């Protein structure tokens, strides 16, 4: 069973004191097993329902991840680990999991009524200063 755990005994000993205790449930699945299942899903990118059954029921893994996320368990865990020196406080998040719509590269917006091309060309650009008029030279006799 220990080959399934994503966390070493040393890593687990640092995390275990921060895991919520006395949570309700008929037959509580081991927290280390569930956290390993959560890490498995997040690292491999598989669906929650495709998590191997060795980590426990997939609904338990999914529900515990969501419940702990709502209670800010993960943020508090990283904060506590940073204070203890186990991890660095600065982290990088890979955003490859974010799905974007195929037309998300350009958004709607801007002015609703746009001037026609001739009017836009005839209009003085707003970024250039007004031309200054030079006085005509006086003719010399």
Image (spheres, grey):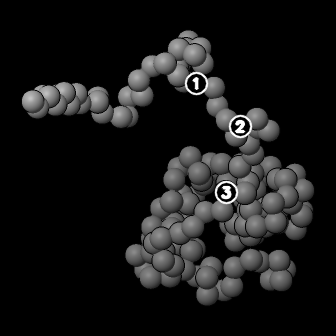
Placement of the N terminus among the 4 image quadrants: bottom right
Q: Earlier in the sequence, mark 3 or mark 1?
A: 3
Q: Secondary structure at mark 2?
A: loop
Q: Residues within 10 Å of mark 2 (few under 14, many from 20)?
A: few
Placement of the C terminus among the 4 image quadrants: top left
Residue that carries the numbered disc 3 in the rendered image:
95
Residue that carries the numbered disc 1 in the rendered image:
109
Q: Residues within 10 Å of mark 3 (few under 14, many from 20)?
A: few
Q: Earlier in the sequence, mark 3 or mark 2?
A: 3
Q: Quadrant of residue 36?
A: bottom right
Q: In the image, which is nearer the foreground, mark 3 or mark 1?
A: 1
Question: How many numbered dots are placed on residues in this image?
Answer: 3
57 vs 77, nearest the viewer = 77
Q: At which x and y percent is residue 51?
A: 86, 60
Residue at 80% across, 83% down: 2
Q: At which x and y percent is residue 97?
A: 73, 54
Residue that carries the numbered disc 2 in the rendered image:
104
For the residues labelled 3 and 1, the Cα–Cα distance comes to 25 Å
Residue at 75% across, 45% down: 99
């Amino acid at each position: 069973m220990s080959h399934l755990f994503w966390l070493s005994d040393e890593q687990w000993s640092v995390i275990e004191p921060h895991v919520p205790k006395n949570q309700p449930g008929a037959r509580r699945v081991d927290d280390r097993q569930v956290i390993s299942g959560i890490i498995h899903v997040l690292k491999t990118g598989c669906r929650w329902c495709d998590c191997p059954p060795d980590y426990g029921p997939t609904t338990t893994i999914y529900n515990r991840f969501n419940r702990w996320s709502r209670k800010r368990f993960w943020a508090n865990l990283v904060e506590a680990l940073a204070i203890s020196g186990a991890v660095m406080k600065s982290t990088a998040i890979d955003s490859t999991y974010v799905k974007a719509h195929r037309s998300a590269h350009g958004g709607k917006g801007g002015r609703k009524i746009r001037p026609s091309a001739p009017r836009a060309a005839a209009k003085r650009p707003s970024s250039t200063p007004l031309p200054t008029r030079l006085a005509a030279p006086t003719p010399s006799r």
